């Protein structure tokens, strides 16, 4: 599903215009981005938890040359699905 498909689905589900649905979509993801940038977490009941994790610095290999290289420490986004979401996904 593309962003445009999702916006259309959201507009139909909420009985609002596509422009309003786009605004809702952008607002939700901007707010979620703000939460993650603060390295906080957001729990959505029956859906899951959005959070960040720290991936520590490590040594890796350049696949083209085989030469060792340092992969820097990074903050990465993480999603943990709720048990109810897992159950719904595996019902079929």
Image (cartoon, rainbow, N blue to C red):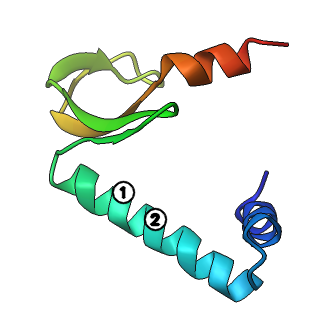
Q: Which mark is residue 32?
A: 1
Q: Position of residue 30 (x, y in %)?
A: 39, 68
Residue 86, horizontal then vertical, whole percent: 60, 17
In the drawing, what numbered circle is on residue 58?
Answer: none
- Indicate the quadrant where residue 51 lies: top left
Pick the residue in front: 25 or 67. Answer: 25
Residue sitting at x 16%, y 46%: 39
Query: Label 2 belongs to which residue?
Result: 28
Residue 77 visible = no
**Total marks in image:** 2
Q: Are marks 1 and 2 in contact (CB under 8 Å)?
A: yes
Classify residue 16 as left or right of residue 46.
right
Is 72 in front, or is 22? 22
**Image-based side of 82 in relation to 76, left or right:** right
Residue 59 lies in quadrant: top left
Image quarter of residue 3: bottom right
In the depicted structure, whether residue 48 falls above or below residue 13: above
Front residue of 64/91: it is 91
Residue 10 place in picture, x, y as percent: 73, 65
Which residue appears at 76% of the width and 85% of the height? 17
- Helix, strand, or loop for circle 1? helix
**Residue at image location 59% in from the left, 24% down from the top:** 85
Res 18 visible: yes
The Cα–Cα distance between marks 1 and 2, rounded to whole angstroms, is: 6 Å
């Amino acid at each position: 599903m593309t962003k445009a498909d999702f916006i259309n689905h959201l507009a139909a589900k909420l009985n609002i215009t596509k422009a309003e649905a786009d605004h809702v979509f952008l607002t939700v993801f901007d707010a979620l981005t703000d939460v993650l940038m603060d390295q906080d977490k957001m729990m959505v009941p029956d859906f899951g938890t959005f959070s960040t994790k720290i991936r520590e610095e490590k040594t890796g290999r350049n696949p083209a040359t085989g030469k060792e290289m340092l992969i820097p420490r990074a903050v990465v986004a993480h999603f943990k699905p709720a048990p109810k979401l897992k159950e719904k996904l595996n019902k079929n």
